[in-house]
Structures are given as structure tokens and as C-alpha cells.
Amino acid sequence: MKIIKYDDRYRDDLFYMYLSAKDALGGVPKLRDDLFDINANYISVGDMFWLAIDDNDRVIGCVGVRSEDNFMWLRRLFIKPTLKRQGIGSALLAVAEDFARAKGVQEIRVHLGDKERYYESWNFYPKHGYEMYLPRYMKKKI
């Protein structure tokens, strides 16, 4: 596996992976508006979006960060459902945190969604030092 900066040639594969990940959570999967133009919504404004790519050149995970005031939001951390618990999410999270540190950001925040559907997130982030600060929101000082 390798982690790369977002590249448009992976756009359709990213959509497939993201929708598969959302489908595995139940409910009707749909793409979020920011994913339709990652360059405009992340990269061109100084933020970032990464893809985890497997040995077959397929997207198996993603994460983005968006700046706001003196912190960053962690966005769209998703892993291909059949590959969870193999360190991909942790590797993507580490890249995002390193990027934030390099930008001088001292805090990262994340919105978790409801605990019933997104229970994996509710378990994942505390293992990486994130703490609840509002219902459905966690943050970490970096």
C-alpha cells in the first residue's frame, strides 16, 4: 500500500470505494459535494486530500483535511470495507496529522456521525488520542 496526494485519474475508483464504504454502514450511500471537485475544495485552497492505493493501483482508502481558523477538520476518512483493521486508516490519519503539524496547526477536529452506524469511528479515534468535546465531535491537540 502507498499513500498519495489525490490525483484525478483515481476519481471514479475513489467514488466506488467511498460508496462501498458508506453502503457497508447501512442506509443509502451518496457522494458528498466536496468529493466532486477535490482540487477546488481541498488542494487549491491549501488543504489536502490523500488516497491509499493498493498494489493493483486501486483506491482502498481516503482522507482529507480542511482548514478553519486555528485548527483543521479531518474529512472523509474511509477504508474499503473488506480491508478494515489492517492499519490503512491509521496510516492515513498519521499523514493528515503530519500535514497539519507542518502547517503549524495545533488541533484537529472530527465529526463522528451517529454512534450506532459509525461505531467504528467512535472506537478508532480515541485509540489515536482524540477526545470528545461536544456530542459527536472529537479533537486532538497535535
Image: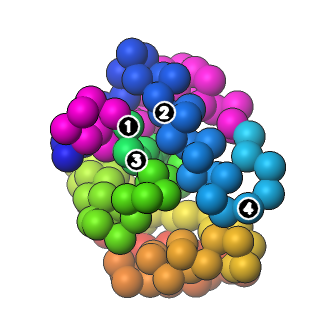
Q: Is residue 36 above or below residue 97?
A: above
State the image coordinates of residue 66 (x, y, percent, origin top left): 51, 44
Stretch of the chain drawn in magenta: 31-58
Q: Identify which amino acid the numbered label 2 is placed on.
A: Leu
Q: Residues within 10 Å of mark 1 (few under 14, many from 20)?
A: many
Q: Nearer the viewer, residue 16 or 8?
A: 16
Verify CB contact (< 8 Å) between mark 2 and mark 1.
yes
Instruction: Give the foreground label among 3 and 4.
Output: 4
Q: CA distance from mark 1 to mark 4?
A: 21 Å
The residue at the point 40 percent across, 47 percent down is 61
Q: Residues within 10 Å of mark 2 (few under 14, many from 20)?
A: many
Verify CB contact (< 8 Å) between mark 3 and mark 1.
yes
Quadrant for the C terminus, please: bottom left
**In the rendered image, which residue does mark 3 sit on?**
61
**In the rendered image, which residue does mark 4 sit on?**
26
Q: CA distance from mark 3 to mark 2?
A: 8 Å
Q: Nearer the viewer, residue 112 or 29?
A: 29
State the image coordinates of residue 50 (x, y, percent, origin top left): 36, 39
